[in-house]
Image (tube, coloured by chain):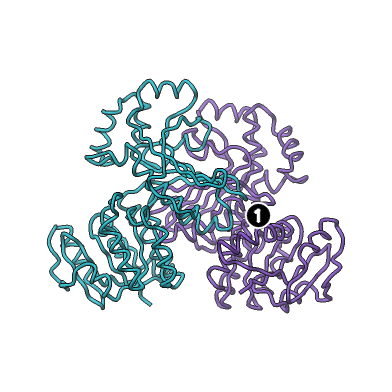
Chain colours: A cyan, B purple
């Protein structure tokens, strides 16, 4: 049976997953028996469209790329009504992250789960602020709330802990959760100042015009919160995670690390300690002999400390357009293969 | 509903999974709703036992550890009959690996799948010699054939490629697949000769009395074959994998690598090349800047080259008693959670 998909937010990631689905149709069908239909798309800029028998996805991609409003299957339903009323099995929430209020993504997710649709999202807002509430709502409605794309989209950390590591008790997760700052620290080691490196990172598109979210550690803090809630299974609020960014690191600090055979990394950590789970984000001098020290550039890496396997480390790319698209695809496939 | 388990082969790994199940009963039940019953155990040394309502597992562990024959619920059925006739949902095949003939494990697996029981195994024989045949038989009988424990038991490579990387096309897998030889190469770098290192590895229990399987690369070749068949989805015979071990590496070779800022690693590789899948095992000089170069001691590491994520690397422990036990547990849980 075809999986019927609603896409809410048709920007970089939304268009990305649409392209991936179009390009990989034959491969996914052959390998997994996967077949799909996009029945609804909602976007603030391009409008809302709905066709219960499947939208004309190539046309809609063309229009969005040309920054034109949708011309076909346009619906008068507002986004929340569309989410509730459409015949999708799963809603992809791909609007922009707001880590303060979580809105409007939080309302989108609630509307979908309430109307018994699974949700797949790369939006850190609902995941960091409301994970447990939504996970419980999904479970009681017999659907799924999957969020691989919210933490290091190109490095499947959540699905690794949920699937291949199932059965292990995880006592600590520690790693490089933000590719932008890891790139900046890597460059600073080559002799550039913080301000110069920031300029280059912005030119390369790694850092936003307002880089606060990355360099102050807020992005990593959101991910630590998600890992605590999902992987550690505790209800942790984002404000309980201590947070220090990389803005105060000086060339003298860089030299000090070198002299100690170490290297600065912005480390996010969530750890069971004396029966409590503690989350933190802070720059650390990591010994060059540690696996995380060798992870350079815009790359993510996480080490899981487990009861049965000791340390297991995964290293992969951070969040780009293709990587985030992949994380959405892999969660869509998971829903398809497990029949929910 | 309780998962009913038959354990065939009650040596190190069989006793290991029994202990893990006993020790983790409460945790597994709370986290996954998992409950189990071991209804049959067959072992060449301790005898065959069967109780459709569950065996006395602590007693049987005690007897096996004391090298005594089983005293309770002993059955006259031979192993193949027991596998066929018992009421297990899943059979764990944990006898010793024979990479030449695969027997008797191959007969055990066939008997279980024929009688519609899922199979979980860490035995490389059936996986390396008959994977596709058994996977098809399992599918047509509505059961599973899971083999995470056959490749780097402590590093969940198969489940990683099947689950969290689903949707990616994998064009190459390359890595350190044999912990024993990696330990030996690490020690040789410190100045020991091949023969001296081998002695230490044998004393530490890393290498067998007859080390041929490890040092000639045969163990790694079996794993490459399994990866080709499962992850790459091609029918590759173990003899199609070119194979060279580490026995010819001299102190002069070690020095040469150092002078080139490199390090010897025994690399197993399976790769799509010009529409064909090619497998190989050989020592390689790996540049110190590559993630695999930093993997020292009895550790495994694999890099997956993918279409959507580029390179994703996983690093974890090799196969010990606990690690292999974990791999069996995680596959049992997978069967339980997906309802087969």
- Asked whether, in this view, residue A29 is left or right of residue B302, the answer is left
Q: Nearer the viewer, residue A212 or A30?
A: A212
* Residue A165 position (above or below residue B5): above
* Residue A255 position (above or below residue B104): above
- Under circle 1, the secondary element is helix
Q: Quadrant of the N terminus of chain A?
A: bottom left
Q: Quadrant of the C terminus of chain A?
A: bottom left
Residue at x 41%, y 45% (from the top left corner):
A240
Residue at x 52%, y 34% (from the top left corner):
A290
* Residue B287 position (above or below residue A118): above
Residue that numbered label 1 is attached to: B324
Residue density around tag 1, few if under 14, some if 14–19, many if 20 or more, within 10 Å: many
- Asked whether, in this view, residue A56 is left or right of residue B222, the answer is left
Q: Nearer the viewer, residue B331 or A97?
A: A97
The x and y percentages for residue A9 are 24, 60
The x and y percentages for residue B16 are 71, 56
The x and y percentages for residue A104 are 25, 59
The x and y percentages for residue A141 are 41, 72
Q: Quadrant of residue B204?
A: top right
Chain of the residue on which disc 1 is drawn: B
Residue at x 50%, y 33% (from the top left corner):
B288
* Residue A321 position (above or below residue A242): below
């Amino acid at each position: 049976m075809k999986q019927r998909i609603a896409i809410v937010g048709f920007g970089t990631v939304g268009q990305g997953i649409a392209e991936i689905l179009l390009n990989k149709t034959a491969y996914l069908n052959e390998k997994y028996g996967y077949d799909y239909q996009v029945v609804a798309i909602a976007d603030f800029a391009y409008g809302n469209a709905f066709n219960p028998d499947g939208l004309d996805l190539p046309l809609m991609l063309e229009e969005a790329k040309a920054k034109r409003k949708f011309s076909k299957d346009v619906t008068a339903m507002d986004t929340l009504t569309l989410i509730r009323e459409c015949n999708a099995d799963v809603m992809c929430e791909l609007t922009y992250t707001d880590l303060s209020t979580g809105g409007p993504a939080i309302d989108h997710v609630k509307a979908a789960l309430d109307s018994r649709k699974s949700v797949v999202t790369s939006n850190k807002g609902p995941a960091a602020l409301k994970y447990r509430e939504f996970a419980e709502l999904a479970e009681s409605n017999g659907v799924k709330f999957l969020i691989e794309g919210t933490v290091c989209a190109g490095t499947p950390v959540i699905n690794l802990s949920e699937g291949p590591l199932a059965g292990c008790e995880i006592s600590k997760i520690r790693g490089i959760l933000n590719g932008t700052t890891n790139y900046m620290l890597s460059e600073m080691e080559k002799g550039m100042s913080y301000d110069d490196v920031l300029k280059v990172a912005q030119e390369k598109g790694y850092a936003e015009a307002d880089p606060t979210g990355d360099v102050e550690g807020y992005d990593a803090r959101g991910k630590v919160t998600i890992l605590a809630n999902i992987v550690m299974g505790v209800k942790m609020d984002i404000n309980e995670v201590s947070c220090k960014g990389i803005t105060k690191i000086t060339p003298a600090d860089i030299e000090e690390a070198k002299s100690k055979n170490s290297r600065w990394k912005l480390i996010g950590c969530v750890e069971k300690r004396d029966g409590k789970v503690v989350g933190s984000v802070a720059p650390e001098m990591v010994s060059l002999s540690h696996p995380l020290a060798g992870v350079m550039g815009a790359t993510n890496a996480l080490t899981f400390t487990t009861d049965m396997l000791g340390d297991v480390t995964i290293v992969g790319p951070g969040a780009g357009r293709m990587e985030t698209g992949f994380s959405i695809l892999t969660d869509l496939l998971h829903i398809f293969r497990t029949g929910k």
